[in-house]
Amino acid sequence: MKKFVAAAAGGIVAGLLVTTQVAGPLLAEESARKSNVYEQLDLFGDIFERIRIQYVEEVDDADLIEAAINGMLTSLDPHSSYLSPDDADDMRVQTRGEFGGLGIEVTQEEGFVKVVSPIDETPADAAGIEAGDFITHVDGESVLGLTLDEAVEKMRGPVGSEIVITVVREGEPEPFDVTIVRDTIKLTAVRSRNVGESVVLRVTTFNDQTTPNLVEGFNKQVEELGGMENVNGIVLDLRNNPGGLLTQAIKVSDNFLEKGEIVSTRGRNPEDGERYNATPGDLAEGKPIVVLINGGSASASEIVAGALQDHRRAIVVGTKSFGKGSVQTVMPLRGDGAMRLTTARYYTPSGRSIQALGVSPDIVVEQPRRAAETPEEEEDTNRRTRSEADLRGSLNNDSLSEDEVRQIEEDRAKAEEAAKLREEDYQLAYALDILTGLSALGPKE
């Protein structure tokens, strides 16, 4: 027994010695790292003082500090930034659904401002700004070299004032100017309508109003169609939706899923990861869903599209989405400012990250650019094709009742409306055709 205790004690002593030998270099390394950080902070202090004393013009101390903070954050990625008290207040207003400006969601690429998407029914949308456009100048001044917040600040101004932005667009040989009048941007998060027997839900942003608007709009359209038995499916239109609140993306997805994971987030530390799961209850009662996306669909839009796609709850149609697969946390700071910091990546239920890759549609459908019609083409479009029924003295069809003839004429009118929609919005018409085709097959047994 004495030998056993001695051996155990010896083991403990040896263990302590080994621990000390390993910990020594680690402590020295940590000490050296801290020392290096303090040296860098001293360097920052020296530069700050020299600028204050020797710069050719007098500078504001607070502006210098703010610029340094913003420079540190923007060096990390395009979505991390410092929010001044005014910017932080603007962001809070935007999540409530109303703010002033042009109506575009932007990011920064290669030093220029890139349009993620124009917001529906805003000055930018009316002026023809498109997802993927690059803004190179504002009122004749280059934005190259400015931070994203500085460039955005240049585009802000009083409601009713005019701004000229210079746009570079793929497919256009030369940059061109676009004049826009600033306005108060009031966002309608979800607009709903019926097209034939389909419910179309156009989701423009993910703010506090998105889920209530979606549920209310959907129920209203179902009621107008006379109940769910008369609905052949839903089109969830997420095109040019720049995203917004993660919580709203989860709620929208949950409205169409009975169970399973919606999205997961993973930060630097594995223990900080979170998973969000669906709760029982499908607003659409199992009816087919087609999700429309394009290059302007980002962030929260991609969460919804990815979740419904992975669960095979929806067919995703359109073109590849934007590819913003990161999560930003807004942290309040002293002085009423805030810091927007990228803290995690998000993953779809199948475990795929869409960062920089985007969501790939199940069916790729491009939206063709509409070419201006010549007078001759317009005349041809308006000229109705003559048929047997137009000939003088033609025989009547005696095999059909009046009700059957009326039904044929109604079906023909629907088909003509569908053809007209293909000219106005080819992608939406394609989505509706899918729902019509699935409805023709009948319900699954």
Image (cartoon, rainbow, N blue to C red):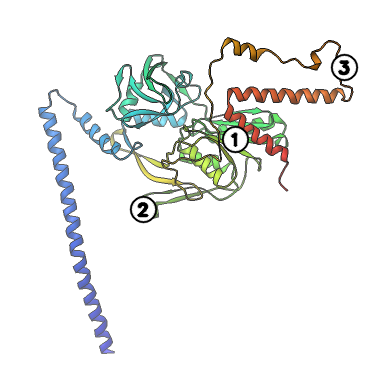
Q: Earlier in the sequence, mark 2 or mark 1?
A: 1
141 relative to 216, above or below: above
Kindly identify which residue carries mark 3.
395
Residue occupying the point 17% across, 55% down = 31
Kindly identify which residue carries mark 2.
269
Foreground tag (2 vs 1): 2
| Snapshot quadrant of residue 147 | top left
Judge from the rendering whether residue 415 lies leftward or rightward of residue 30; answer left or right: right
Pick the front one: 375 or 23: 375
What's the amino acid at mark 2?
A: Asn
Kindly identify which residue carries mark 1.
215
What's the amino acid at mark 1?
A: Val
Give the x, y percent position of residue 36: 16, 49
Q: Secondary structure at mark 2?
A: loop
The answer to whether mark 1 and mark 3 are in CB contact below 8 A is no
331 relative to 205, above or below: below
Judge from the rendering whether residue 355 lies leftward or rightward of residue 74; answer left or right: right
Q: Secondary structure at mark 1?
A: helix
Pick the front one: 198 or 82: 198
Give the x, y percent position of residue 119: 47, 26
